[in-house]
Image: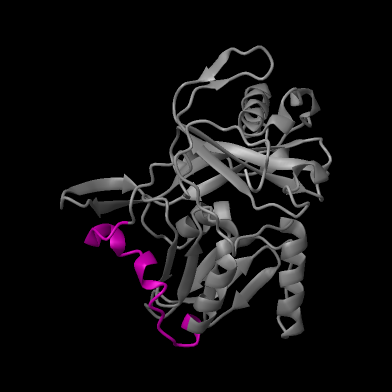
Amino acid sequence: KSFFDDWQAKGVTSVLHEKKGGYANNTSSIYALAKKAEDEGVRILTGTSVKAFKSANGSSAITAVETDKGTIECEQVIVGVGPWLRDIWNMLDLPKSINIKDDKGNVHEDYPMWQYWFLTEGVLRLNPKTQMTNEGKMPPVVHVDTDAPLYSDVDKSLITDKLWGIYYKPDFHFHGIQGGSSPYKVDMLADNVQVDPYGPDSEEFVVGDDFAHMWTSALAFCQKRFEGKSHLYKQGPTGGLGCFTPDNFPIFDIFRENVHIIADSNHGYKMIGVGKLVAEQVLGAKSKLLEPFSYSRFEEGKLHPISNSPFPWS
């Protein structure tokens, strides 16, 4: 309550405050990162679609990338495409399933390489300044996981008595309180998931009334200032897709001799720091920080721990 004097969430047994954490508008961040790159002489070809990769002379190394704007010859390829990784992966003829050794030494054969999760997000049309701390300062992102029963803030009906989670923050770009709830596995093979059109333009992977009801009730569960505010939920299509690895952690590795893949597994802003490490790797440096995220970890049984959180990236 030293942050929020109206805090009232039940079933929370521990608190982690990441003091070096933060958040920013994603579009603004991408433009700022692009400017940094262009200031270094990088040429960015926006609106360009990758169609295929070429190799030559019996080598698996990629010698050119075929795009809808022509063929680009290359010495190195760096892939960081978020939920579209599945398509690039398939173009590179990389395996759609793998063998995984678990922590008991058992091998699980033909395990799907990629699993899509449906990401649920929305906005409460409330002045962002409503969510300042007791001292009037910008707050951290609030992330709550709990198994306490969640009741409707509208009619007091039970929404869930199972493990659930939400996150939220004041957002001056969206002019409200922005956040989401724990995502859902998409119950189909990765190759069958329609990634495009993405986000609000999708007809399949956008949130509906159930999410709005749950999320606004969860906000009220956490802080009294959000009670009775569900009618302020901003209606409209929102949501997205994340492309996850078998253990839900990223893969940073080199494939086909010269293809550096950053498979983010929906880990967001942490990837900015990874970009620097991969750039150093392209120049020949070895990174101890990247080693635990190698592709070989699955067959070697060096998996990352399974989270007890309803969020696969926690």
Q: Is residue 72 magenta?
A: no
Percent coordinates x, y for residue 236 in the rendering: 77, 31
Q: Residue at x 64, y 44 (%)?
A: 196
Classified by dominant secondary structure, the portion drawn in magenta counts as: loop
Q: Quadrant of the N terminus?
A: top right
> Is 8 located above or below residue 263 in the figure?
above
Q: Residue at x 43, y 38 (%)?
A: 189
Residue extending furthest toward the left: 105
Q: Residue at x 34, y 56 (%)?
A: 304
Q: Quadrant of residue 33?
A: bottom right
Percent coordinates x, y for residue 4 in the rendering: 67, 43
Question: Is residue 272 rendered to the left or right of residue 304?
Answer: right
Give the camera-side residue of 27 and 75: 27
Question: Is residue 134 rendered to the left or right of residue 288?
Answer: right
Q: Quadrant of residue 39?
A: bottom right
Colour treatment of the image: one colour
Percent coordinates x, y for residue 186 in the rendering: 49, 35
Question: Is residue 125 rendered to the left or right of residue 243?
Answer: right
Percent coordinates x, y for residue 121 in the rendering: 65, 38
Q: What range is drawn magenta here?
A: 281-303
Residue extending furthest toward the bottom: 284
Res. 193 in view:
no
Give the camera-side residue of 79 and 163: 163
